[in-house]
Image (cartoon, grey):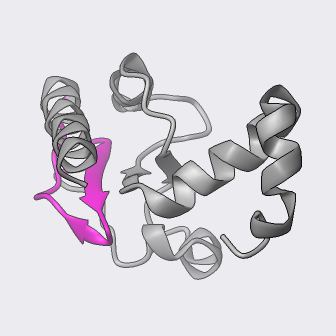
Amino acid sequence: VETLRPLLDVIGKAPTAFGQMLCSLDFYLGPQVEVALVGDVSSMGSGMADMLRAVRHRYMPNKVVAAAAPGDAEAQRVVPLLANRPQAGGRSTAYVCRNYICEAPTNDPAEVERLLAGQEGMRIQEAAEG
């Protein structure tokens, strides 16, 4: 936020020149939704393609998505969102989280879409109240 303060006059005169910076500010201020996917990412098998379609179905600019194969210790080390997220039932699994608090994991792409729709509804409500 402090980075933008010296630029306020210029941003007001040429807002289209600062699109990415304003997107960054929105990401910083707004609630973010995090989605961790655990499954066969190399072949998109075990339902991973369906999970990715579900995650991509709804436009949510502040959505963070990370995916890894089950037991990929390097991915879990490098991407904290993937840490301690086991695959459930041997099938692709999604964890939909908000502010690092996750819903119960699911193997159902339709449930992922429902959870993301609920997260977006909460974002709109917070913006209206804020």
| Quadrant that contains the C terminus | bottom left
- Give the tally of numbered discs: 0
Q: Looking at the image, is 83 positioned above or below residue 113?
A: below
| Residue 67, horizontal then vertical, whole percent | 51, 50
Residue 54 lies in quadrant: top left
Would residue 36 appear left or right of 16 to someone viewing this image? left
| Residue 29, horizontal then vertical, whole percent | 47, 61
Would residue 82 appear left or right of 106 to someone viewing this image? right
User: Residue placed at 55% from the left, 41% from the top?
Assistant: 41
> In front here: 20 or 83?
20
Residue 95 on the magenta span: yes
Name the magenta segment's main secondary structure: loop
Q: Looking at the image, is 91 positioned above or below residue 77?
A: above
Residue span colored magenta: 89-108
> In front here: 12 or 1?
12
Would residue 115 appear left or right of 3 to someone viewing this image? left
User: Residue placed at 51% from the left, 77% from the top?
Assistant: 80
Residue 2 on the magenta span: no
| Residue 81, horizontal then vertical, whole percent | 45, 69
> In front here: 22 or 44?
22
| Residue 109, horizontal then vertical, whole percent | 23, 27
| Quadrant that contains the N terminus | bottom right
User: Residue placed at 36% from the left, 32% from the top?
Assistant: 46
User: Residue placed at 41% from the left, 32% from the top?
Assistant: 48
